[in-house]
Amino acid sequence: MINLILFGPPGSGKGTQAVKLVEKYNLVHISTGDLFRSQIAEKTDMGMKAKAFMDKGELVPDEVTIGMLKNKMLAHPEAEGFIFDGFPRTIPQAEALDIMLADSKEEIAAVLELEVSEEEIVERLLNRAKTSGRSDDANEDIIRNRFQVYLEKTAPVAKHYAKVDKAHKVNGLGSIDDIFERLVGSIDTVLAC
């Protein structure tokens, strides 16, 4: 089974690349944002727990998020692996994910970190705002703050996986196809080991 974490700052192209990787490797894409929205819409127990925190503007506790991830994985026994997008965002979340996978005798095969400069992210998100309608994509100060939050809180997750030789930096500049080929090269190298 191939379990991957796709990683990078907001606007680095994670969502676009995840779709392509899902098709190539027959993976199930797990986006925590999508997962929260679907669980809330279905009014599951975990969805309602998550909604209670979200309605107060609080972060959903890791144990609720991990429970949702586990349920999503159990719902796809046919999967050849999973690609996690938007999770883990912190080292405690990474540790919780590692424990959950170990309970199923699984592990993360690779963390693929898309490297994109702050200036490129600002340009991409300001352009995306023209069609996305997302207010957080239209304000340069907010974009720069999101980038700094990524560097401070989320980027250390890559270091967590680097300690066990699972973190791979991938140049996130160029065409969608160029970036995809770099990601595939990294994954295929991991799979060959």
Image (cartoon, rainbow, N blue to C red):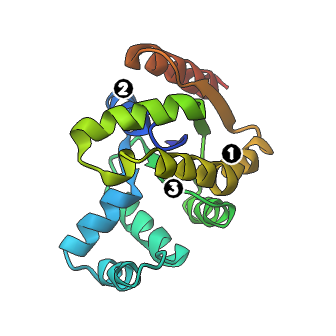
- Local SS, label 3: loop
How far apart, in angstroms, are the residues tagged by discs 3 and 1? 12 Å
Residue at mark 1? 158
- Local SS, label 2: helix
Residue drawn at 37 percent across, 46 percent down: 137
* Residue 24 numbered tag: 2
Residue drawn at 53 percent across, 52 percent down: 146
Residue furthest toward the left? 42
- Crowd around label 3: few <14 · some 14–19 · many ≥20 (10 Å): many
How far apart, in angstroms, are the residues tagged by discs 1 and 2? 24 Å
Residue drawn at 41 percent across, 15 percent down: 175
Amino acid at dot 3? Phe
- Local SS, label 1: helix
Amino acid at dot 2? Lys
- Whole-percent x, y for residue 6 in the image: 51, 41
Q: Earlier in the sequence, mark 3 or mark 1?
A: 3
Q: Quadrant of residue 180?
A: top left
Residue 162 appears in the picture as rendered: yes
Q: Is residue 109 left or right of residue 180?
A: right
Q: Earlier in the sequence, mark 2 or mark 3?
A: 2
Residue at mark 3? 87
